[in-house]
Amino acid sequence: MSAFTDAVADGLVGLTHVSVVSEESHFSWAPCDVCGSMLGGDREIAEAVVEGTANHVIELSICTDCTMYLANGDEPEDWRIK
Ligand SMILES: [Zn+2]
């Protein structure tokens, strides 16, 4: 575990079946919905199902670090919350 995986685990509490849906990133200064990084950067769209519901899907705006992690399990080398 690392600070990053801790932050992701916190960000995904109550959510399940997280999947990245957009391959088209857009720049944003809004904090990442998963790890909470305040660093401005590219954001991808992900979807997740709210735990305990059959199909209540919410949309998440996630940073490239989280995109890589959710897609491949790759952890960023120098992630920090800012
Ligand atoms: Zn993130």
Image: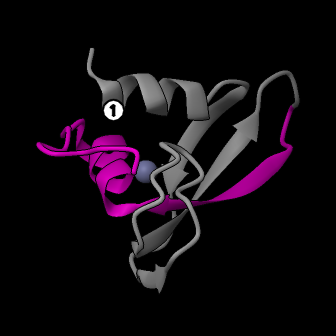
| Pointer 1 residue | 4
Q: Position of residue 63 (x, y in %)?
A: 41, 61
Q: Which residue is painted at 77% across and 53% down in the image?
A: 58
Query: In the figure, 38 relative to 27: above or below?
Result: above
Quarter where residue 52 is shown: top right
Q: Nearer the viewer, residue 51 or 29?
A: 29
Q: Which residue is painted at 45% across and 71% down in the image?
A: 43
Query: In the figure, 49 relative to 42: above or below?
Result: above
Query: In the figure, 51 relative to 42: above or below?
Result: above
Q: Nearer the viewer, residue 58 or 75?
A: 75
Query: In the figure, 9 relative to 11: above or below?
Result: above
Residue lying at the far top of the rendered structure: 1
Quarter where residue 2 is shown: top left
Amino acid found under the numbered disc labelled 1: Phe
Disc 1 Cβ-to-ligand 1 distance below 8 Å: no
Lateral position of residue 15 relative to residue 50, left or right: left
- Whether residue 67 is in magenta: the answer is yes
Q: Which residue is painted at 41% across and 80% down in the image?
A: 25
Q: Position of residue 16 (x, y in %)?
A: 64, 30
Lateral position of residue 27 relative to residue 73, left or right: right
Q: Which residue is painted at 39% across and 51% down in the image?
A: 82
Lateral position of residue 82 relative to residue 10, left or right: left
- Whether residue 26 is in magenta: the answer is no
Under circle 1, the secondary element is helix
Give the colour scheme of this rendering: one colour
